[in-house]
Amino acid sequence: MKQNKYFSAERFARLLRNDFLIHKKSYLFTLVGISIAAYALMYYAMITTKHVTINQYTGFIVFYMVGLGVVIGTAFPALTNQNKASSFLLLPASTLEKYLVQFLIRIVIFIPVALLIFWICAHLAKASLIPNPEIGFDPELSISDFSFTSLFNLLYYKDIAPILLGIFSGYSLLFAGSVYFKRFAIPKTLIFFGIIVGVVALSFKVFSHFFFPVSAANYTINHLIYKISSDTENIKLYFYIIFGCPWLFFLPLAYFKLKEKEV
């Protein structure tokens, strides 16, 4: 059938199995590494401060999510080596299947597994603490139990979806960068992102000279802020769009860049 040219379940399963057999040690060491790092970070913080609230877990998970971004940014490892890249591109599988294998492993499977590991490490770190009556330290009272529900409860419910989409957009950028750049993909992607942010900020400054010449001359920029609804302002909606929608561009970019390499 014509669709077999793009996707075949049997061929995809073989490609997925092949990738797992080749990189299984790398995947295993990665999971072990992030587990040890997450546990050590939280245990050190708990034993040092003797008091951890659910708010403080936010800092831990932000640091942890940055580490996950490094794993996602190293997708398509074969493309970093010319000989391996040639073998990878000649594999008897479609571009879509090669793309989906990496997307499935690095994002669809890896992120939920990594979040589960974080949850386990948080509870394990607390369970490892020993009460010290001399200083009045009781882990059950001083250290809050971690849960993703409690973490989400700290956020306004309308902000949860944009934040999750923003994280997904960041991971999509790193995923696309792993295809686009041959070597040092993560540093180059971050430099590219920094340049884009700088250009956008400079554009705001330039346009402010046209629309707010007096304020711009004094190095201040006035923003016309107004409510779109009872709890949403225009500037808030702007940031929702800026950080929540880029994945719609980056994921297709990764696919078509891989297809270009195939050609």
Image (cartoon, grey):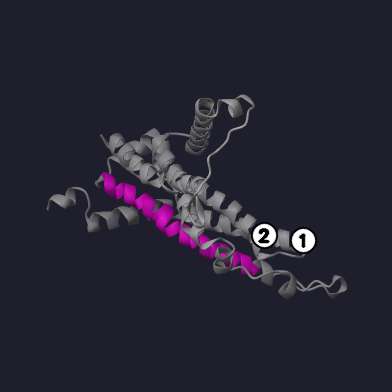
Percent from the top left, x then y, of residue 110?
45, 57
- Residue at the extreme left of the image, as rendered: 1
Q: Dot 2: what SS?
A: helix
Specify whether 65 is left or right of 81. right
Residue 56 seen in the figure = yes
At label 1, the amino acid type is Thr
Which of the two residues, 138 or 121, is positioned nearer the viewer here?
A: 138
Percent from the top left, x then y, of residue 93?
25, 47
Please report the bounds of the magenta region as a residue range. Answer: 95-124
Residue 72 seen in the figure = no
Q: Residue at x 40, y 46 (%)?
A: 247
Residue 56: which numbered mark, if any? 2
Of badges 2 and 1, the one in the foreground is 2
Mark 1, other Cα within 10 Å: few <14 / some 14–19 / many ≥20: few
Asked if residue 253 is positioned above or below residue 150 in the image, the reply reads: above
What residue is disc 1 on?
49
Percent from the top left, x then y, of residue 206?
52, 26
Which of the two residues, 163 or 259, is positioned nearer the viewer here?
A: 163
Q: Quadrant of residue 122?
A: bottom right
Mark 2, other Cα within 10 Å: few <14 / some 14–19 / many ≥20: some
Task: Say whether residue 118 is magenta.
Answer: yes
How many tags in the picture? 2
Task: Say whether residue 103 is magenta.
Answer: yes
Give yes or no for contact between labels 2 and 1 (Cβ–Cβ under 8 Å): yes
Which of the two residues, 184 or 226, is positioned nearer the viewer here?
A: 226
Q: Residue at x 55, y 53 (%)?
A: 65
At label 2, the amino acid type is Gln
Q: Dot 1: what SS?
A: helix
Q: Quadrant of residue 253?
A: top left
Q: Residue at x 59, y 26 (%)?
A: 214
- In 3D space, how far apart are the residues under numbered discs 2 and 1 (Cα atoms)? 11 Å
